[in-house]
Image (cartoon, rainbow, N blue to C red):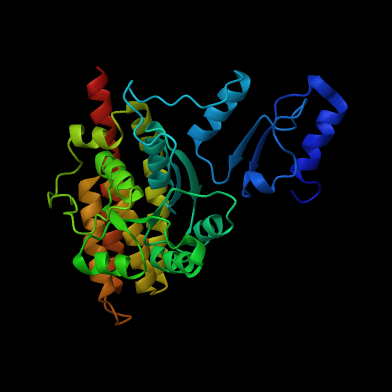
Amino acid sequence: MPDINGDDVAQSIVNLMGEDAPKIIIISAYGRALIGNEFGDDIPVYSDFLSKPITPLQLSESVERVLNNRENPVVENNGRLQRLKGKHLLVVEDNIINREIAYELLAAEGANVDLATGGIEGVDKVISGTCVYDLVLMDIQMPDIDGLEATRRIRADGRWNNLPIVAMTANVSLEDREACAAVGMNAHISKPVDLEELVNTVLLVGMGTSTEDKNVSTNDSSYELIEDKLSLLRRFNNNKNLFKRMQSMFVPEMQTIIEEVALCWQTKQWHESTKALHTLKGAAGTMGAVRLSRRARDMEEKFKLINDDNAVDVECSGLLVELIELVQLSDGALASLIDNDER
């Protein structure tokens, strides 16, 4: 903070109030090892530690954990074995919806999950060495540096030559897979992420087994408005509360991305618009908005070929309207999917 840092504030509160001091949770972009005060003193300054960025679930779990004097978070998993228990994973993903879903699915399987909102932050978290990760899940297209460049920088530090890195990408062509392998990625999974594929890949790669020679699942080319309920809920580990939380974020997030697309088109930044369309494609696919995801994919491919500044001026406004309409239609269908199921 600009005037006084949080560490000093917390220490002052404890000095003034002693055992009557309230519970204090530290939220920091730095690893726990870099924080001046340690846990476990007679009057600990901090009751818990959260590493930025955090998700709503992480925050609520931390508050509940501290107020109920629990050491470990309680994660619902329908009574099933937590297959990733004890794994420390880093998810590098710029899209908030994809990031939140990845966190909650992995946490439900028992993993300890850290998050990075971009490639540079992901590289910093690995290279700093404050946390030693069992595996990194790396988005490929990100606004600062892409997942390929992030992986190159991590591999350039010899300490992390054996760190498993798995690409998460909506592009599953042979060329994309070869590009991932060329920079030292161990495997890749397709977006939208399927829970079983995610867990199996983490387990296989974590044991040193490559998945590059295995078939990668892809979605069919159906142009239905939204995905069928069974496969969609399976992606969310049949957690309807998680799905509803993500669905409430769907329209605001889609609108933000579409505004970015519109700005790129207005300024004739065709290449930049394909990055935003790629993000739209992946986020919509994760939420099961099939037709929106496919349309964004078609537009992404179209604008990759644009060179003439005047080639698509007339067409852009109509495409924006189409995207906005698909967002609204998809949101209504997704809401009805769960509402009808609960009646």
State the residue at coordinates (26%, 43%).
194
State the residue at coordinates (51%, 34%).
58
Q: Where 96 sits versus 230, above or below?
A: below
Q: Position of residue 265 (x, y in %)?
A: 37, 69
Q: Is residue 124 visible?
A: yes
Answer with the quarter of the image where residue 6 lies: top right
Q: Where 304 sits versus 44, above or below?
A: below
Q: Position of residue 94 (x, y in %)?
A: 44, 54
Task: Classify residue 71 as left or right of residue 224.
Answer: right
Q: Where 322 sits versus 85, above or below?
A: below
**42 and 46: which is toward the camera:** 42
Q: Position of residue 210 (x, y in %)?
A: 27, 56
Disc tally is 0
Task: Classify residue 266 as left or right of residue 64.
Answer: left
Q: Position of residue 152 (x, y in %)?
A: 43, 69
Task: Classify residue 257 as left or right of residue 44.
Answer: left
State the residue at coordinates (75%, 29%).
41
Answer with the quarter of the image where residue 129 lies: bottom right
| Residue furthest right in the image | 16
**200 and 147: which is toward the camera:** 200
